[in-house]
Image (cartoon, coloured by chain):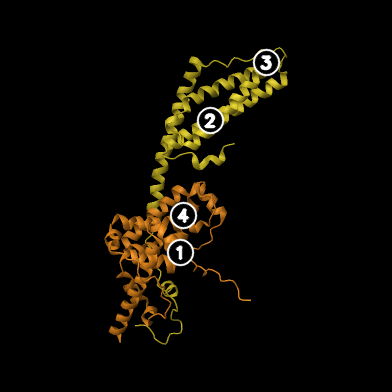
Amino acid sequence: MAPASLPPARPPSSFAIDVPQALVGRAQRGDVQALEEIYRSFERPVFNLALRIAGDRELASEVLQETMLKVIDHIPRFRGGAPFWSWLRQIAVNEALMQLRRGRRQSRELSNEDEDGFGEDTGPLPPAAADAAQLHRALGSLPSATRTVLWLYHAEGYTHEEIATLMQRTPSFSKSQLSRGTRRLRTLLNAEESVHA
Amino acid sequence: MHDRSNSNAPATWREAFAALPIAEPADHWPTIASRVGRRRTAVGWVALAATLVLALALPWKLQRDAVPPAPVSNPTGAPHGELETLYAQSAQLEALLSYARDDRVSSGTAATVSAQLDQRVASIDAALTQPHLTATRQRDLWRQRVDALRTLASFETNRRLLSAQGEHYDGALVRVD
């Protein structure tokens, strides 16, 4: 008998770091050393997520600081219903998106959104996708909202529904951005490929 | 330029993204730690100020108008020493409550908890008005009254303090009996 179809497994997030409950407990009681340990564990995932979304080291640094200050402020209320890392990641994503909204980048970029072409791109990747520098450049040239959807979906494993909630849009918007963004990424990488050939 | 024959080439976008180099952030911990320190100092001053207000105002208030609640007659010979202490504690806690309470900073859930605690005190008071209470029963009820008032005073002072810090009590309700 054919096995029942299961939803696709979510990719592991760069945030998926196991934080001992004892460490969280110490941090909740205001232990500065515990707070620093938490900061050290998550500074890279937060910074890299912010860098991909905001596209700028300076803005990413601001997101990192604001995220960690919020974590420190709110950690006494963390009740452990979800893993600590996913709670912290939620704060980081919200803070990065807030940074985008402050810069009003998103509103300009999203004014011409459409909802065509929802099909997910499952074809083989262009060879240039293996080149970190070229992929980095291609991602950097995408509109920040499109890049954000690509990153949250592929790198962090969020669903379209979750992305829609985070970005205060619809799931259709998320699907549309993913589809268009992936097509654009392919075009950019193929163009790089032609130049280098 | 990338190596076309590389067998480790990513098969999916997820793999391609995961292979991007990790950027190293600058060390922002000293800035964060100092900002946290400044916030805590500010919060500490608010708490100290609130404590001082209570410490200075309460004895004055107690001296001025604290009157023990009228106890029921004691025909059963309950130990007067202990009852007198319980009456005095009740009066002090009620005076503290009158200072700590501020309905302007109440949230819906906090008001509900407060009302439930008030109800508990009221039901004990009703029990105390019953005739023919034994000495033991009378003493137990006064102990319950002091306990209930202590819980209520603690709840209200915490709520007032949290409010002074720009927070609310809803997240801490689980700590209330």
* Marker disc for residue A159: 1
Determine the CA span between mark 4 and mark 2: 41 Å
Residue A77 rendering spot, x and y as whole percentages: 50, 47
Chain drawn orange in the picture: A
- The answer to whether dots 3 and 1 both sit on one chain is no
Q: Earlier in the sequence, mark 2 or mark 3?
A: 3
Sort mark 4 into few (<14), some (14-19) or many (20+) by Cα contacts within 10 Å.
Answer: some
- Mark nearest the camera among 4 and 2 is 2
- Mark nearest the camera among 4 and 1 is 1
Query: Residue at 42% of width from left, 54% of height from top?
Result: A68
* Marker disc for residue B115: 2
Determine the CA span between mark 2 and mark 1: 43 Å
Q: Can the viewer see residue A156?
A: yes
Residue A98 rendering spot, x and y as whole percentages: 35, 55
- Mark nearest the camera among 3 and 4 is 3
**Chain letter, disc 1 residue:** A
Q: Colour of chain B?
A: yellow
The amino acid on which the numbered mark 3 sits, given as a three-letter code, is His
Q: Left or right of A133: which side holds A154?
A: right
Q: Tags 2 and 1 in contact by the CB under 8 Å rule?
A: no
The amino acid on which the numbered mark 2 sits, given as a three-letter code, is Ala
Element type at mark 1:
loop
Determine the CA span between mark 4 and mark 1: 31 Å
**Please, is residue B137 above or below residue B175 in the view?**
above
Q: Which residue is mark 4?
A: A36
Element type at mark 3:
helix
**Chain letter, disc 4 residue:** A
Q: Tags 3 and 1 in contact by the CB under 8 Å rule?
A: no
* Marker disc for residue B80: 3
